[in-house]
Amino acid sequence: DQQVKQNSPSLSVQEGRISILNCDYTNSMFDYFLWYKKYPAEGPTFLISISSIKDKNEDGRFTVFLNKSAKHLSLHIVPSQPGDSAVYFCAASLVYSGAGSYQLTFGKGTKLSVIP
Amino acid sequence: DSGVTQTPKHLITATGQRVTLRCSPRSGDLSVYWYQQSLDQGLQFLIQYYNGEERAKGNILERFSAQQFPDLHSELNLSSLELGDSALYFCASSVSGGSYEQYFGPGTRLTVT
């Protein structure tokens, strides 16, 4: 049972255009969402996050939107650059009270290719 | 470079064997997490340690175990290996036991033949 789904395995975008990566989740208890970026032969690196109490968070060229009613989030990259070509993972977390542990549940990833 | 190191980078072994994967967290980080990424799968959370103690457990098989040592490095032990255990194993670290932002190492690729 996949609680975090990235339905598009790949996406190609022209340099300078907008890239939109989508993510859906099923567990309404998730309270924090993150995007990680992964280059080949490297571990994932944290990109941007959003709390469930917000609907938008922006950091430079990257903006994450959260639609709680639809259980959907998206990552917008504007403008897209060839260096953005990587696999992007959506992740969700919920805190286990008492233990204070934050488990991340990841999607399968979307491979973004930005074409010069 | 995230500051998290993992050794070895690659490991090839036979079914039924036992291996140990090692992780050193970023300087100052007390929490270590282990994840497994099988082919075409997302990262699956296995286990978390915080300052030497187990903090949370995910989908970790009984054949797998982990520990965190006083110097905060961690080891993931995989025994009675099966072909399906072939995967990338990532270690991540964070400052506290409750931190959303985790910093990942480069991973260990395990191949079971």
Image (spheres, helix red, strand yellow):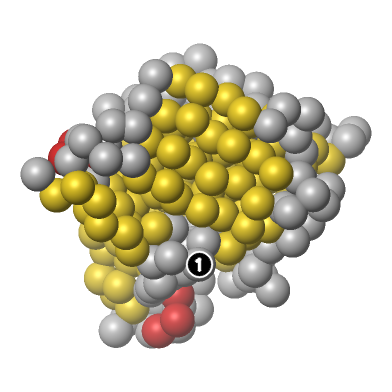
Q: Looking at the figure, which quarter contains the N terminus of chain B?
A: top left
Choose top left, top right, bottom left or bottom right for residue B67.
top right
Residue at image coords 50%, 67%? A7
Identify the residue position indicated by label 1 in the image.
Answer: A7
Can the viewer see residue B34? no
Q: Compare residues A5 and B9 and report the one nearer the observer.
A: A5
Residue at image coords 30%, 73%? B111
Q: Please tell me how crowded label 1 is: few (under 14), some (14-19), or many (20+) other residues with Cα within 10 Å.
A: some
In the structure shown, which secondary structural element does the residue marked by tag 1 occupy?
loop
Indicate the position of residue B66 as horizontal and vertical percent values: 58, 51
Q: Amino acid at mark 1?
A: Asn
Indicate the position of residue A17 as horizontal and vertical percent values: 27, 40
Q: Looking at the figure, which quarter contains the C terminus of chain B?
A: bottom left
Indicate the position of residue B101 as horizontal and vertical percent values: 56, 29
Indicate the position of residue A98 as horizontal and vertical percent values: 90, 34
Q: Compare residues A87 and B19 and report the one nearer the observer.
A: A87
Residue extending farthest to the front is A17
In the rendered view, would you say B4 is above or below A19?
A: above
Residue at image coords 62%, 29%? A56
Choose top left, top right, bottom left or bottom right for residue A106.
bottom right
Q: Is residue B111 left or right of residue B83?
A: left
In the rendered view, would you say B91 is above or below A49?
A: below
Residue extending farthest to the top is B28
Q: Is residue B74 left or right of residue A33?
A: left
Can the viewer see residue A88? yes
Q: Is residue A79 left or right of residue A59?
A: left
Residue at image coords 39%, 19%? A60
In the rendered view, would you say A1 is above or below A106?
A: below
